[in-house]
């Protein structure tokens, strides 16, 4: 008798599961993957969703510099999104997706994290690069210009090769951090971004241990807008932007 009392709840459970699947399981795409649907908190506007689902795969790295004259259409980030600067701009669509992402982060209770760098012009990157070289030489006066430049190249981009020149990326910082470094990895924001950035169209651009492909050391704070479809594919497969572009032909 006891086997019947076991089977009945089991078959009832299976029937429930079947009914749930009839009502709750979404249609499958031709590739067999379930259709990607996301809950955004708070709900996003049509313009925000359009920004997140648009695509921008522009590549800027040491092998593919952007032209000195390249200048994206920029918008100013609102004051409550930024820290340590009076003004930070980003490319318009990426900015809208980023602000939606910040809203999501705030809605999940993370209010100590801000953008500390967005678009940088060629001239600014040049100034920054030269400043780093002078710092390296000050720290070690025996370095030649070329040696100092080689060191700086391991953590900063030569003018034209910085992704910040595209306006498509942002550096994040918490208010307790005094400088931009990988202590960001221990923040709640980093944990949140690891989980959620892709659904807002952003990727961790310089992952740990991928210096050989990206040309840059690990930067836990640097996020790049590519659009939701590419961001999710990149995250799922554990790729870099370079590898994704390569695989997409
Ligand atoms: Zn950056």
Image (spheres, grey):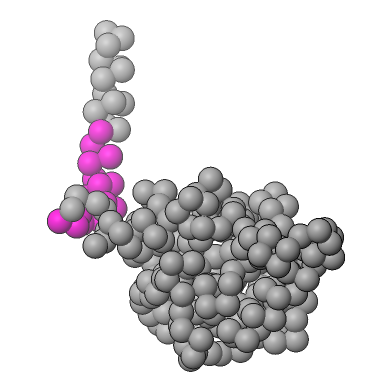
Magenta segment includes 28: yes
Q: Looking at the rendering, which quadrant does residue 234 occupy? A: bottom left
Looking at the rendering, in which quadrant would you find the C terminus? bottom left
In front of the other: 36 or 11: 36
Above or below, 66 against 197 in this view is: below
**Horizontally, is 220 left or right of 160 in the view?**
right
State the image coordinates of residue 148 (x, y, percent, origin top left). 71, 63
| Residue at 49%, 67% in the rendered image | 62
Q: Is residue 24 magenta?
A: yes
Q: Is residue 9 left or right of residue 124?
A: left
The answer to whether residue 107 is seen in the rendering is: no
Answer with the quarter of the image where residue 101 lies: bottom right
Q: Is residue 17 above or below residue 156?
A: above
Q: Nearer the viewer, residue 223 or 110?
A: 223
Q: Is residue 70 above or below residue 210?
A: below
- Residue at image position (37%, 71%) is 57
The image quadrant where one finds the N terminus is top left
Q: Which residues are magenta?
A: 14-30
Q: Position of residue 49 (x, y in %)?
A: 41, 76
Q: Is residue 151 visible in the rendered structure shown here?
A: yes
Where in the figure is residue 179, as x and y percent of width and height? Answer: 78, 63
């Amino acid at each position: 008798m006891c086997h019947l009392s076991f089977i009945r709840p089991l078959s009832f459970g299976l029937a429930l599961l079947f009914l749930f699947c009839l009502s709750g399981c979404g249609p499958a795409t031709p590739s067999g993957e379930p259709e990607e649907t996301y809950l955004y908190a708070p709900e996003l506007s049509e313009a925000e969703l359009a920004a997140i689902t648009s695509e921008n795969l522009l590549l800027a790295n040491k092998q593919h510099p952007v032209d000195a004259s390249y200048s994206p259409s920029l918008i100013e980030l609102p004051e409550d999104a930024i820290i340590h600067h009076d003004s930070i701009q980003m490319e318009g669509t990426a900015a809208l997706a980023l602000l939606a992402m910040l809203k999501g982060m705030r809605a999940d209770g993370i209010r100590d994290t801000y953008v500390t760098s967005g678009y940088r012009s060629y001239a600014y990157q040049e100034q920054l690069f030269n400043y780093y070289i002078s710092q390296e030489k000050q720290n070690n006066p025996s370095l030649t210009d070329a040696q100092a430049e080689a060191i700086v190249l391991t953590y900063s981009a030569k003018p034209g090769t910085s992704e910040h020149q595209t306006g498509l990326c942002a550096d994040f910082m918490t208010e307790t951090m005094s400088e931009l470094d990988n202590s960001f990895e221990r923040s709640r924001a980093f944990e949140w971004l690891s989980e959620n950035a892709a659904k807002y169209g952003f990727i961790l651009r310089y992952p740990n241990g991928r210096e050989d492909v990206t040309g840059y050391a690990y930067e836990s704070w640097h996020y790049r807008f590519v659009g939701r479809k590419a961001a999710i594919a990149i995250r799922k497969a554990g790729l870099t932007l370079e590898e994704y572009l390569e695989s997409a032909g």
